[in-house]
Image: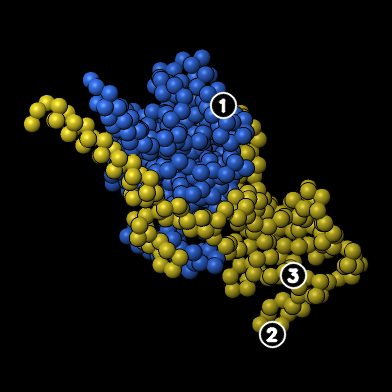
């Protein structure tokens, strides 16, 4: 190889590699590729308590780095002899949407783009016709004459279609009735979103944005810990609260007391009383055979 | 074409392809996803768990101004109270009680002070069956007429609860009738609704034109 050839080849090769490197520039934006530990993490159900402890610490470290606040992340297990049921009184609901925003605050949901677990439908009196349902109503005050309101969120089905379609078993039903998602196992294929007849599942198209001062530090692994871009999420009956014995956030904020929650296996709980003695008229889209644990009822 | 020329061609082709890509990325020919429209933070009133009104008992508990509960700072114990009615049999409220809305029951059937208040002792309430109750223990009075609602409330099916669903884990707080219902006008007051969802979908809701829910 002579001198001229050598210089020419080297120059061309340098230019070529530089061009290649520059053309891969968009890869630099893949910032949220986190630690090796996260990548190598085992399936949730296979984690030993010590491994779970390390995972929780890793999550706490990550949240602290990002939000400047040390959270308290727990892996709460289902309680024995407990199966959760939700009852919602359609006679009482006035459609004020406070439940929607209490849920956003409690569960560290993305503020922009907006992710909300609860959708409040407004329907004209007379029938439950989803075709006539409207969720963008915004009058000066509610309730409006001639309408009733029906909040819809995850129905925690006994026969959940979303669980059946998940190709990686990242979502499953726990023995207290809550269908959970492991955000570290989800591949974001959105099959579950398509399978859900209640439109209850939400996808993180972008990295969720939660203002640092609005972060709720009381977290659960299967609950409200911050999600990544590209994973599914949905209502989990405030697992971080309800598995610690507390009421969910949407229930506590409801100004009319339309929302009722409890253990159906306890005959003295309010949900048992309601299912026994009230006009519980539907499980939404009952004909699909999903058997929701979310019941709508009337007072009269 | 000889081998060397072929190699050179492939190399030049790849390099120029990469150069074009580089140029395209630098010039942002594909563009970046447009920045999202700002969504104002939701008013804290919509995440507030307070009841819609402050009951007398709550006022006393939190050390607020409960002077409105001392009837005999204005009324005279020895003097009998005379109620005044207009031509339609509506009660005429004195100036001191102008803040009350008399709206208990339909057709103006239960808007008489002494259906609930004790005529002889204003600091007491009286039920129809003759029991006397303290002013701050009014739930039993409500229950003396609203039996089924009282039964539901006792079972936890009517009214607001907060705290713990599990008695083993902690206490449950239950609100009284008058924490949500004004006894003089018990219908639940209309509320301002929280902002509606901001849709990301193309062709979704705009400020002027709400889209249909699916």
Q: Is residue B15 left or right of residue A255?
A: left
In the image, are marks 2 and 3 on the same chain?
yes
Q: Which residue is mark 2?
A: B87
Seen at 44% across and 21% down, the residue is: A36
> Alpha-carbon distance for marks 2 and 1?
74 Å
Do tag 3 and tag 1 residues touch (Cβ < 8 Å)?
no
- Quick one: SS at disc 3? loop
Question: Mark on residue A41?
Answer: none
- Is residue A42 in view from this perspective? yes
Q: Are marks 2 and 3 in contact (CB under 8 Å)?
A: no
Are both tags, 2 and 1, on one chain?
no
The part of the image, by quadrant, that contains residue B179 is bottom right
User: Picture coordinates of residue B175 (x, y %)?
Assistant: 65, 48
Give left or right: position of B64 versus B18: right
Q: Which residue is mark 3?
A: B99
Query: Where is residue A247, by image quadrant?
Result: top right
Q: Which residue is mark 1?
A: A61
Residue B166: x percent and y percent?
58, 33
Q: Residue furthest left?
A: B1
The answer to which image quadrant residue B14 occupies is top left
> Which residue shows up at 26% across the image and 35% down it?
B15
Label 2, label 3: how far apart the Cα atoms are:
22 Å
Of marks 2 and 1, the one in the foreground: 1
A78 up-or-down from B99: above or below: above
């Amino acid at each position: 190889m002579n001198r001229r050839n050598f210089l020419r080849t080297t120059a061309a090769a340098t230019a070529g590699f530089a061009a290649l490197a520059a053309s891969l520039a968009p890869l630099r934006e893949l910032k949220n590729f986190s630690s090796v530990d996260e990548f190598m993490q085992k399936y949730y159900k296979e984690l030993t308590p010590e491994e779970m402890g390390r995972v929780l610490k890793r999550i706490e470290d990550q949240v602290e780095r990002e939000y400047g606040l040390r959270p308290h992340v727990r892996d709460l297990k289902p309680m024995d002899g407990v199966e959760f049921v939700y009852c919602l009184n359609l006679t009482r609901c006035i459609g004020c949407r406070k439940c929607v925003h209490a849920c956003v605050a409690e569960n560290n949901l993305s503020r922009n783009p907006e992710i909300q677990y609860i959708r409040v439908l407004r329907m004209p009196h007379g029938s439950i016709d989803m075709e006539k349902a409207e969720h963008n109503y915004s009058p000066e005050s509610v309730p409006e004459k001639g309408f009733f309101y029906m909040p819809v969120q995850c129905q925690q089905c006994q026969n959940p279609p979303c669980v059946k379609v998940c190709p990686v078993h990242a979502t499953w039903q726990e023995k207290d009735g809550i269908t959970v998602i492991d955000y570290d196992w989800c591949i974001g294929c959105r099959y579950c979103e398509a399978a859900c007849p209640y439109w209850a599942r939400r996808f993180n198209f972008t990295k969720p944005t939660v203002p640092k001062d609005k972060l709720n530090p009381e977290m659960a692994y299967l609950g409200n810990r911050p999600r990544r871009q590209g994973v599914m999420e949905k209502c989990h009956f405030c697992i971080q609260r309800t598995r610690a014995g507390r009421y969910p956030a949407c229930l506590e904020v409801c100004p009319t007391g339309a929302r009722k929650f409890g253990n159906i296996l306890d005959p003295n709980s309010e949900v048992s009383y309601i299912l026994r003695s009230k006009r519980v008229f539907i499980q939404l889209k009952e004909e699909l055979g999903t058997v929701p644990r979310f019941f709508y009822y009337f007072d009269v | 074409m000889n081998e060397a020329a072929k190699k050179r061609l492939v190399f030049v082709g790849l390099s120029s392809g990469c150069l074009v890509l580089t140029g395209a990325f630098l010039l942002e020919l594909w563009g970046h996803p447009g920045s999202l429209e700002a969504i104002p933070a939701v008013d804290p009133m919509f995440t507030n768990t307070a009841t819609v009104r402050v009951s007398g008992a709550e006022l006393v508990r939190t050390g607020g101004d409960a002077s409105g509960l001392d009837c005999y700072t204005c009324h005279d114990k020895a003097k009998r109270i005379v109620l005044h009615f207009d031509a339609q049999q509506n009660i005429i409220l004195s100036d001191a009680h102008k803040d009350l809305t008399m709206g208990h029951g339909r057709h103006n059937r239960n808007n008489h002070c002494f259906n609930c208040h004790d005529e002889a002792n204003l600091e007491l309430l009286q039920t129809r069956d003759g029991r006397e109750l303290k002013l701050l223990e009014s739930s039993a009075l409500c229950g003396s007429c609203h039996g089924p609602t009282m039964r539901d409330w006792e079972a936890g099916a009517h009214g607001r609860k907060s705290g713990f669903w599990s008695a083993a884990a902690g206490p449950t707080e239950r609100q009284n009738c008058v924490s949500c219902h004004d006894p003089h006008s018990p219908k639940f007051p209309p509320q301002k609704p929280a902002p509606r969802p901001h849709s990301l979908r193309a062709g979704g809701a705009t400020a002027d034109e709400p889209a249909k829910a699916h």
